[in-house]
Image (tube, coloured by chain):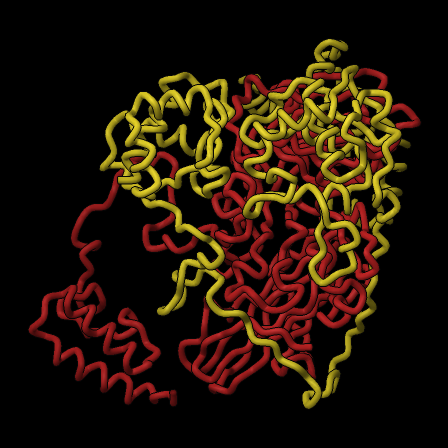
Amino acid sequence: MSRSPDTLRPRGGILFVLIALSILIIACKDSKQDQIATTTGAEHLDTPSADTATHTMDRYGIGTVADAATIAGWDIDVRPDGLGLPAGEGSVEDGEEIYDEKCASCHGTFGEGEKRWPKLSGGMGTLTLERPDKTVGSYWPYASTLWDYIYRAMPFTAPQSLTVDEAYAVTAYVLNLNDLVEDDFVLDQDNLATIEMPNKDGFYVDDRPDTQNRRCMQNCVDPETRVIAEVISGITPTDHFKADGNLGLAFTETPPAQSESNALSEIAQRGQSIYATACQVCHDSGVGGAPLLGSAEQWASRISQGREKLYQNALQGYQGESGFMPAKGGRSDLSDEDVKAAIEFMLESSQ
Amino acid sequence: MAWFTRSTERQLLGLLAKESEQLGVSERRRFLKNALTMLGASATLSAVPGTLANSNLPPAVPTWTRSLGRGVVSDPYGKPSSFESDVVRRTVPWLTADSISSISMTPLQDLKGIITPNGLVFERYHAGVPDINPDEHRLILHGLVERPLIFTMDDLQRFPSVSEIKFLECPANGGMEWKGPQMEGLQFTHGMISCCEWSGVRLSTLLAEAGVKPEGKWVLAEGADGAAMARSIPMEKALNDALVVYAQNGEALRPEQGYPLRLLNPGWEGNTSIKWLRRLEVGDEPWYMREETSKYTDLMPDGRARKFSFVQECNSVITSPCPEKPMKVPGFYELEGLAWSGHGKITGVDVSFDGGVNWQTARLKGLVLSKALTRFSLPFTWEGQPMLLQSRAVDETGYVQPTLSQLREQRGGNSIYHKNAIHTWRLNSDGSVNNVQVT
């Protein structure tokens, strides 16, 4: 909001204060304001008085009316009753193909989950066990959530890249991995809401507070019966405050590769930022058999076939015994030059 | 190791300093540092006046007094002193599959007062931080409203604004500690919390502008990030104290915090305060998004789970001493800590030095605001004895922060979120501090 230079002059300033005061007076008489004050209760006490002015008018006339077409482009949410589902369909069979190409590298061929990526299937009957497996089949209450999330945010490296039909197909396949639909099942906008998830009744609305501690001040517990559990050592990053500290890399199978930017060629430096947004997810963790950044050994076998072959696999995709590489890492928005720069970065960082 | 008296310590250091006089400055510094470590002595080099010939300590005149410093705008956006390079957000590398969908923690051990500096506010992303051009950012408000509206950032800044100090906490704060103490520092046991002054528009103002239809009971908030992170917010909260903010601590939101626009639900699970806010849809029922079914639901021992567990209940922790800030010498200390409640104001904090047997009431320090971090303090003298330090906060609803046993009795060990139990630090006789659990 730009302020007129006039308001900076003393006379304008006084006028401004008078207007502000009159707005406050009007606000105090506003019945709508009273209503809001009642619902907010004690919390309203610490809100600044200036905000009472926000309720002096029903409308400020700010903003533009949004037409249906504008809203439609962003309105992607789907509810358990099927509201919001677009017209379309997808089969388990088609879903399997898409899943193997775009999902399996993180979620596992059968939904078992690679590394720390989410497990999608199995886990039935484990919710009361010491180590519960909360999967789509064992935990998720509604199939609509699966469609919504796949369409909105998957695959992880290329969100909102699936077509409506592809989202139906992948949803159908993940349901199939959980034995919730048959192999020949075709999912569409009409039958999705009819699918009953095994754990649909497993949720209830928050009923806290669930503890009733009291403010005891003297002799509150018997020190003799107390049990003191010691902290696990070595899994927390402690190098910044302990002389014998560590980086907390426990459970990290491969330490992240260290690269010195200044030692990199110009093209590799450009590739470094592309790597961070397009390649890192798999090449830092080894998901899908991806050669790890910093592993000279793993990269040596790749480069032995020549750079052109390496480029070709990265640009067009590759599937073989050693692993799986989606075309351009699933990032079709990248130019060939971008991908080559990222490869250059990985090669130079892995010598 | 037994404590040296201060005078013995000073004599020893004096001898060492004399011994090392023929060494170069950096070698000498290293020599003295090693010697100090070997002795287990408590003083640091800077605390020993006159031990270094080329010292910046009195009576010597420091180098920075005998030279000129940097001029104005040599650093147009200022940064902390280079000596504060340890005061940074940190993560636990093994916690998540990838840093793009992960969390970092605020260094509570280094902060004063109740405001978290913008560069230290904890991060939580589900698909990384998008780089949004505010000129191309829009907020659409639609659904069960009289007038679906689309706002530019300029539009939003024309509405009357408010500024409020509120904490923001991830419900997984402390979640690694349900089954036992795992984290060796305060930053990792409690650092998924920050507190800022947030500026923006009341969500109720925007809803009034669009005109909510009577059947509108829920608001879906959705982000513009790669996760299109979305959550269903009850209309009651939306009309009560929810804010749509574009600034934190006086400047535009940081990209990590949702630049250019985010929702802020005071006192609620941080993930409901949708960042990079692009869309608000009014509906008559919740949507059951992934982040309110698969995640952010609390699994109970009977195999069922709590849903819509929005409020961050009353919690507290002692921030000094803590594992990162051990005691260096016996003597006077001001024990300090932070308390907060998603239900309103903190009305009291008690501190125990003996693991919960006896308690003393601490003083609330500075601003005591609803749904904001509140600092508490209790002066005490430490004579080198081991202690079990605990804090217990009470909020304006009368709710008393529970013990770990009370929480586990209700929720078992698999609910991941909302662990707000009384926390214990063990202060050892050598001044070091460990995370322990007392049950």
| x and y, in percent, of residue B418 in the image | 71, 56
**Quadrant the C terminus of chain B occupies:** bottom right
Task: Name which residue lies at 44% across and 36% down.
Answer: A322
Q: Left or right: where does residue B51 sit relative to residue B327?
A: left
User: In the image shown, does A332 or A222 lie closer to the viewer?
Assistant: A332
Q: Left or right: where does residue B377 sit relative to residue B80?
A: right
**Quadrant the N terminus of chain B occupies:** bottom left
**Residue A28 visible in image:** no
Task: Name which residue lies at 47% across and 59% down.
Answer: A250
Q: Is residue B296 above or below residue B328?
A: above
Q: Left or right: where does residue A263 sit relative to residue B214?
A: left
User: In the image shown, does B328 or B386 lie closer to the viewer?
Assistant: B386
Task: Name which residue lies at 68% across and 73% down.
Answer: B350
Report the number of numbered marks. Answer: 0
| x and y, in percent, of residue B274 in the image | 66, 35
| x and y, in percent, of residue B352 in the image | 64, 78
Image-quadrant location for residue A210: bottom right
| x and y, in percent, of residue B171 in the image | 68, 51
Image-quadrant location for residue B355: bottom right
Task: Return the residue found at the far left.
Answer: B22
Chain B: its colour in the image is: red
User: In the image shown, does B294 or B5 lie closer to the viewer?
Assistant: B294
Q: Left or right: where does residue B80 sit relative to residue B306?
A: left
Task: Name which residue lies at 60% across and 22% down.
Answer: A11
Q: Is residue B357 above or below residue A250?
A: below
**Residue A11 visible in image:** yes
Chain A: its colour in the image is: yellow
